[in-house]
Image: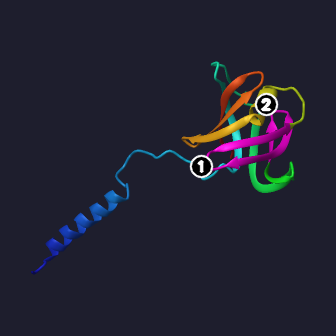
Amino acid sequence: MFFNRQHVFIYLTVVAALLMSGCDLFENEQKPLIPDSIFGTWELVEIRYDNGETLKPDFNESYWFELKEDTVLAEKEYQYSLEGQSNCNYCFGYYDLDQETQDIKIAFVCNRLICGMATEFASSVATTFQYSFTHGKMNLFFETATEGKGHMILIPRK
């Protein structure tokens, strides 16, 4: 069988098209950003309570925490450490997590200055029991004694 230039060109064009279609190069749909891990610095977008109430920080308020990969000795065990800010309050603590079940327990200790929604943020973080990711955002599910159940929505802090 004899191949001329036209046959080779058609063959290469078909192969290139097949290779590119297998690499999703023709898709216009963007895939959602999924964080690699829970570790890093997370900033509050809003707190949503199951009763329908929603709290959002003002543009000049800062609510964040950094879930570090280093550990500290706490409660006779090594736990991951964290630090953060609840508006006008410096916060620190530790946490334990199970990445398979997405269970998390956070000890979040902050100064006691009352400003903005510092109390609501600190109590929500401190009563967190589970996390999940949706479209690049982290959801922390909590249950406080005063406000009940809900979840916080956080984004990676730049």
1 or 68: nearer the eye? 68
Labelled disc at residue 156: none
Depicted 142 relative to depicted 23: above or below: above
The boundaries of the magenta stretch are 82-109
Q: Is residue 47 visible?
A: no
Residue located beneath label 1 in the image: 35
Alpha-carbon span between mark 1 and mark 2? 25 Å
Indicate left or right for 48 with 73 as reference: left
User: Residue at position x 13%, y 78% from top?
Assistant: 3
Instruction: Answer with the quarter of the image where residue 18 lies.
Output: bottom left
Residue located beneath label 2 in the image: 123
Is 124 included in the stretch rendered in magenta? no
Please provide percent x and percent y for residue 31. Answer: 46, 46
Q: Earlier in the sequence, mark 1 or mark 2?
A: 1
Residue type at numbered disc 1: Pro
- Bin the neighbour count of mark 1 within 10 Å (Cα to Cα): few under 14, some 14-19, many 20 and up: some
Indicate left or right for 3 with 32 as reference: left
Instruction: Answer with the quarter of the image where residue 154 lies.
Output: top right
Q: Is residue 110 visible?
A: yes
- Bin the neighbour count of mark 2 within 10 Å (Cα to Cα): few under 14, some 14-19, many 20 and up: some
The color scheme shown is rainbow
